[in-house]
Image (cartoon, helix red, strand yellow):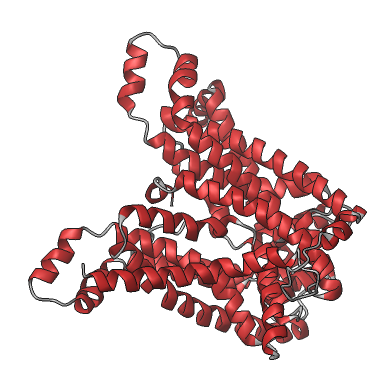
Amino acid sequence: MKIGMRYIALSIIILYLIFIYTPILVSILGSFSSKRFSIDLSNPTLEWYMRALSNRDVISAAENSIRLALSAAVISTMTGMIVGYAYIHRRPRSFIETSIYIPIVIPEVIEAFTLALLYIRLGVEMGFITVLAGHLTFNIAYAFMVIRSRIEMIPREIIDSARILGAGDRMILLKIILPLTYPALLSAMLLTFALSFDDLIKTLFTSGPGFKTLPVLIWSMVGRGGVSPEINAVNSIILSISLVISGFISYIIRRDLQKIL
Amino acid sequence: MKSFIGYKLLQVLRDPLSIVLLIVFLYMLIFLYIPLAVSVGEILLGGGVNTGIIANSLPILVRSVLIALISSALCLLIAIPISYLLSFYTKPLEKNMFIVLILAPYWVGSLLKIYALAYLILVLESIAGTRILYTETSLYIGLIYNYSPLAIIPIFLSMERIDRTHIETSRSLGAGALYTLFRVILPISSPGITSAFFLVFAGVVGEVVVPQILMGASNYMVGQWIYQLTFSFHRLSDASLLSMLYLILTLALLVLIVRRGGTGGFTI
């Protein structure tokens, strides 16, 4: 490996990272700027945030988003753990496994549209529950994907020897499996929370007029007048929260990447 | 035979874990597979497909496919060199750090990222005085911005799996770095490259957020048009037909790629 090539490589990768991060950083800086669409931080202002937070729609959308993402994260992580646990005892029939993974492969617009169609044809009133039901399909898939890879890494010998030494199923679950899989549980929980919190397409199709999450609210505001500093302030808050969560997930799963994907 | 099935069923119901698996399977059935079937039923039995609307929709579908082809080619053009440099020219610690940094924005919702990009473009416009937003340039910048990490990950992972002795052998037999790249590394990592192509292509065809925000038109690509047909025009049969065409296109491509042996990492 020549020294020169190494520096060229590093600089190209860093250029790419700059491309990825500049929009995020500029829009966050811009949310403190006193001028519209130009970054002037000589007298930073919280005006856009004040305007955004005094908007009642924003507050209720934030509540909806958090409620939705928390429910989706808890339910799908628990389900993913149970399905993963079943994996230790016997490999589930492969068609069950495939049926869980399929939501990751099918484009989201198709899933969202067909589910909305089912709701419309059944005459279901759309709201929190219909959105949650739609989110759970892809969230269970992701949670299972993350948890399974970790559970598969537990050596069978440990479980077998625990059993020989007299541990029951409960003891094995509490003392061996849970302590060894908790990083995966944590990343599954964070991942499903982030996915639900940021989701637009599935929520847009299945939410009806009464239930708005933050992404849906941003979407409808964009539809009414393009990009504006007030929406950018709301966007910056969610973007920063999501980026921190997402960075944390990436950090947890970086070593298991080969096995998860 | 009947009593055998009954016996099997009893065995399944006696075991709490099997019951949970069964419930998860039924859940997926109700909220994923039955809706797909309902959509097929809607085409056959619903309000009837309007040939005029479909004739007008086909150009949108074709445009979406073309945009997807171009943007997946562009993404590969960026992702292959980045993955190559990342996999072969960085130290383990840097590699780890870069991969976390590339992956981090990936789980963030695309609306938030694309909105931030639109804001950046507006800032640049006010500095440069040229018009970028609502042009094809901004559309492709947005698509590359959103989808290139998705292309990098599978290619990088398949390059990481390459046995490093192959490279040493190739180099010690007199092949230069470029020759090794084109004759050894790229052929071995072709499953990752095909997965990357599939992931970007299948995603871009149905893209809603990027064209809406960066092109400003609400029927530029097929995903947006499906939404419009459903909620603005209540043409459920036509929307069903379009989404089934899109699904068939995706699945056909997937089968083609799996047949060719390129399955590495398409689950991301």
Residue found at the very far front of the displayed protein = A42
Residue nearest the viewer, comparing A70 with A230 = A230
* Vertical position of residue A133 compared to residue A112: above or below: above
x%, y% of residue A176? 43, 22
Residue B38 in sight here? no
Left or right of residue B163, residue A87 in this image: right
Residue A153 x/y as whole percent: 37, 36
Q: Residue furthest bottom?
A: B130
B3 sits left or right of B31 in the view: left
Where residue B101 appears, as percent x and y from the top left, is 49, 58
Badge count = 0
Q: Residue at x 76, y 63 (%)?
A: A32
Question: Which residue lies at the image location 37% right of the left edge and 62% below the top edge?
Answer: B156
Which residue lies at the image location 77% right of the left edge and 63% below the top edge? A44
Q: Residue at x 81, y 54 (%)?
A: A207
* Camera sees residue B95: yes
